[in-house]
Amino acid sequence: MLKGDVVIYAYMRQYVNSESLPQQRKTIAAFALKKSININKEVIEYTTKNVSVEERFEFEKFVHTLEDGDMIILNDISILSSLAEDVVKVVTCLMSRGVKVLVADTGSSIDKTTTLGEFLPYLNDLSDAQKRVSKIIGRPKGSKSNSKFDSLYSRILEMLNGGYNVSLIARELDVSRSSLKDYIESRGIKDILNDFSIAKEPLKRLNDRLIICLFEKNNIIKG
């Protein structure tokens, strides 16, 4: 395959509580067949525990290989991460690179045209799943400590995007303003929103903005 050609990846990940690899492969293959998509490469990531995305070094290497126009097919959105905030960071990074994500189990796609409103249902599902799993197995080693705001992550994101300030959100959710402010800052939610917005700008404007992807804190890249 010549450099510059679009590459379509089937990306699978084996981790705690994930679908089995054979089931992921089956779902992706059925989706690709239905959509008449020719998968060029298969990538499998193995993780023995639910760690934060910053600690998944093989995934980091994979992201570095992606180019504008490439596509990734996933069994479901949690393959990117089981943590809602990490999913937003990864999706923002992929959008800034011009990479399209296809989600097989829902038949949907995520790219630069995707709005936050269209993306939020993914986060709601992840937050609910994360809440259920944390009750069973506790906090995964290496992940951020649980917060009572985790289940409200997508609502907080939506309200901030809608122009609500921290005081209004705290009143709406009936929570402490100071605790909410600390949570928003610790999770970098405002920065995530800003990056998500930048990543959807038209290419001619995006090229004039700098995006720092999750794994590239020491290397500034252009979208």
Image (cartoon, helix red, strand yellow):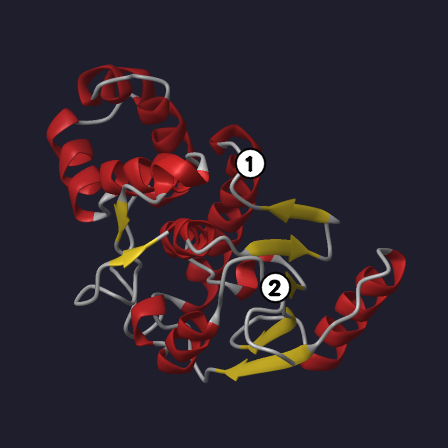
Give the percent coordinates (x, y) of residue 41. Answer: 66, 79
- The image quadrant where one finds the N terminus is bottom right
Residue at 26% x, 66% y is: 216
Horizontal side of 36 relative to 93 (left or right) equals: right
Q: Residues within 10 Å of mark 1 (few under 14, many from 20)?
A: some
The answer to which of 152 and 215 lies nearer the viewer is 215
Give how far across and how far down residue 79 sits, in percent: 55, 65
Residue 99 is situated, as x and y percent measured from the top left of the image, at 53, 56
Q: Does residue 217 appear in the picture of this structure?
A: yes
Q: How far apart are labels 1 and 2 at the CA level?
A: 16 Å
User: Which badge, 1 or 2, comes first in the chain's sequence?
Assistant: 2
Give the labeled residue for mark 2: 72
Towards the viewer: 181 or 179: 181
Relative depth, front residue between 83 and 91: 91
Q: Which residue is mark 1?
A: 113
Above or below, 56 against 145 in this view is below
